[in-house]
Image (cartoon, rainbow, N blue to C red):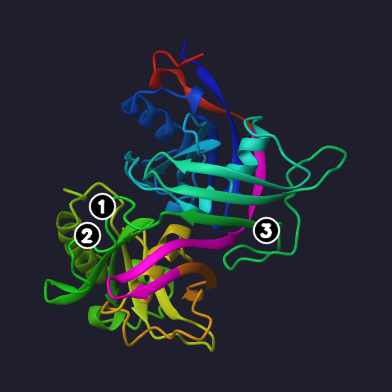
Amino acid sequence: MSHQIAIPCLFMRGGTSRGPFFNRHHLPEDLDQLAKVLVAAVGAGHSLNIDGMGGGVAVTTKVVMISPSMEEWADIDYFFAQVNVENQDVDFSPTCGNMLSGVGPAAITMGMVPATPGETTIKIRSVNTGAKIEAILQTPFDPLPRVEYSGDARIDGVPGTAAPIMLNFMDVVGSKTGALFPTGKNTESIDGVDVTLVDVAVPMMMVRAEDMGVSGYEAANELTANKALMAKLEAMRLQAGERMGLGDVSKKVVPKVGLLAVPRTAGGTVTIRYFMPWQCHPSLAVTGSMAFAGCVLAPGTVAEGLAVLNDQTNQLVFEHPMGQMETTVDYKVNEAGLDLRSAGCLRTARLLMRGDVMIPAEVLRQLPD
C-alpha cells in the first residue's frame, strides 16, 4: 500500500512571497531527487497547484532550504528553489530577496541560531549566488529572546503592518557573471531594441517600456496577458542570457527582465515592471531592486533620461504595480563608472504554519533520516 512521508517544515511569508522553509538536511542531496520532492510539495504541474502547497503564481511557489553555514563569515546557508507553477520544473540558479527576509526568523525557530535580547543580526550566505547578506530582526526579551512578528513596518503588496527586517546585501555586483555589465557595454541592442544587461544581486535585461510598445504603468496581469509582449521579451531574454555568459536560459529564470518608465509620483526614482521572467511580478523582488539600482545609478544605461535622482541619492524609490519599494545604496560614481558597495531594503515576514509536508512515498524510494 502506498503511503506518505512526513518532512518537517515552516510555512512562511517572506516579503511579498511565501512558501515552505525546510532544514536542508531533511531533504535529498541529489538535485534531481530534491526537485521531485519540491514539485510534489508545491503541487507543480497544475495551474492552481491543487495537489500541493503552492498558490498558483510564481511568488507562491518558492522554496527555502537553510542549514548552519560551514563558511567562516556566515551563520546560515540559504538555498533557494523556484518551482514552476504549471510545469514540473525547478530552477536552483536564482535567489529570492523577499523569501530571504524569512531566513533569519526560520533559523531562530529551527534552533540553528540563538536570538539575542532586543535585536539579532544574522549573517547569511546565498548558496545559489554566493551573495552575502546581513539580516537584522527584532527579538525582544520575553522572558527569553524570541522572534517578533508584530510591528509598525509596512511594505506595499502585503496588508497591514509587521516587525521590520532590514536586509543589507554585501558585494552585490556581478552575482552570477562577475561584472556589473557582463558584456562590457552600458547599453546595446537586441532585435533592434536598446537594452542594458546588468548584474547586481541578479542578472537582468533592462528595457524602456515605450520601446516595447507599452507605457510601463499597466497592471501586472495586463502585461502578463499581453502575449505578443511576452513572446518578444522572451526572445530577447534568451539572447541576453547568451551574451551574459549564462548559456541556454530557456528553462532558467535568470536573467530576469525589467521595464522602466518615468516615475509618476513626487519622490519616485523610476517606475518599473519586473518579470520573473514568464509573468510580471505583482510588486518587485528585493534582488530585482538591487539590479534596478545599478541600472539607474550607472551612466549611459537605458534608465538615463527616465530616472529622477534627488539630492538624497542613497535612497531610491521604485514604483511598482502595488506601490513602492525603497532601496538604500552605498555607492560612488567615478571615472571607472559605478562603484556600488552595498544595497539594502526593509522587508517583513510572518510564520504562517509549522508542521510536516506530506510527500507521496513513490516520489522517492528513500529519504535521508
Is residue 280 something that shows in the picture?
Answer: no
Quadrant position of residue 143: top right
How far across and down, in percent of the image, does residue 208 sit? 28, 79
Pointer 2 residue = 182
Viewer-proximal residue among 201 and 22: 201
**Left or right: where does residue 268 sit relative to residue 340?**
right
Image marks 3 and 1: residues in contact by CB distance under 8 Å: no
Viewer-proximal residue among 163 and 201: 201
Q: Is mark 1 on a helix, strand or loop?
A: loop
Would you say residue 123 sits in the magenta stretch?
A: no
How many angstroms separate mark 3 from mark 1 (CA)? 31 Å
Would you say residue 349 sits in the magenta stretch?
A: yes
Task: Give the mark nearer the N terminus: 1 vs 2.
Answer: 1
Up/down of 34 relative to 133, above or below: above
Task: Give the mark nearer the N terminus: 3 vs 1.
Answer: 3
Instruction: Give the residue furthest to the top.
Output: 1
Pointer 3 local density, CA inside 10 Å: few below 14, some 14–19, many at least 20: many
Specify start and end residues of the magenta stretch as a single range: 331-354
Instruction: Say which mark, if any, is on residue 177.
Output: 1
